[in-house]
Amino acid sequence: KPQPVPGASLRITVNPAQRVVILRAPKRVFGADFDPWTAAYLAVVLSQEGFPSPGVWRVRDVLPRAAQWRLGGGPEDTNHTRILDVAWPAGAQPTQEAMLSAYRPSKETNMDLLGPDDFPRLRMVRPPAP
């Protein structure tokens, strides 16, 4: 289960003209043995929510139909992803759509009762060798 890292903040730089977003985090967040060339990464886009559903960390819900402060286009279950987009290589298999839709739908409202197998799993991306 993910845990916040106290005192670790991201610095975000956006350059729309170059279509580049840079995220910087303190190296200590990743541990002493961290090697950026052998690590795997995954970047996703979510919608921030000030008043999230129970068990969801400040991520806006995706409902079947859009409503005030809620996104639309989601299925009827409670454990579907709230990820809007994945930075995934073009043409890579499986597709992000396949990964995000591969889970057992549930109506459980207490997210703490669900385990990792109840949610979509995404593969990580490794950088090319230097």
Image: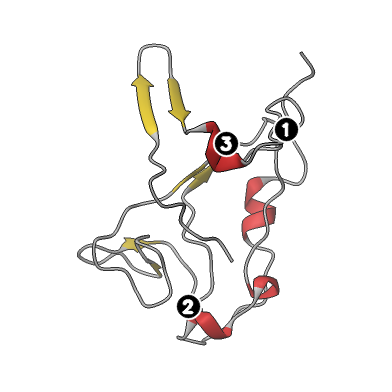
**73 lies above or below 93:** below
Q: CA distance from mark 1 to mark 2?
A: 29 Å
- What residue do we see at 20% from left, 65% from top? 68
CB atoms of marks 3 and 1 within 8 Å: no
The percent position of residue 31, horizontal first and vertical second, equals 63, 41
- Pick the quarter of the image with the C terminus: top right
- What residue do we see at 69% from left, 64% from top? 102
Q: CA distance from mark 3 to mark 2?
A: 26 Å
**42 lies above or below 14:** below
Q: Nearer the viewer, residue 59 or 93?
A: 59
Residue designated by label 2: 76
Q: Nearer the viewer, residue 102 or 2?
A: 2
Residue designated by label 3: 87
Which comes before the other along the chain, label 3 or label 2? Answer: 2
CB atoms of marks 1 and 2 within 8 Å: no
Q: Secondary structure at mark 1?
A: loop
Outermost residue, left direction? 68
- What residue do we see at 48% from left, 33% from top? 26
Q: CA distance from mark 3 to mark 1?
A: 12 Å
On the picture, is 112 further left or further right than 96?
left
Residue designated by label 1: 91
Q: Nearer the viewer, residue 90 or 60?
A: 60
Query: Please, what is the three-letter code of the amino acid marked with disc 2?
Result: Glu
Mark 2 nearby-residue class (10 Å; few <14, some 14–19, many ≥20): some
Query: Please, what is the three-letter code of the amino acid marked with disc 1?
Result: Gly
The percent position of residue 126, horizontal first and vertical second, equals 74, 32
In which image quadrant can residue 64 be found? bottom left
Q: How many marks?
A: 3
Mark 1 nearby-residue class (10 Å; few <14, some 14–19, many ≥20): few
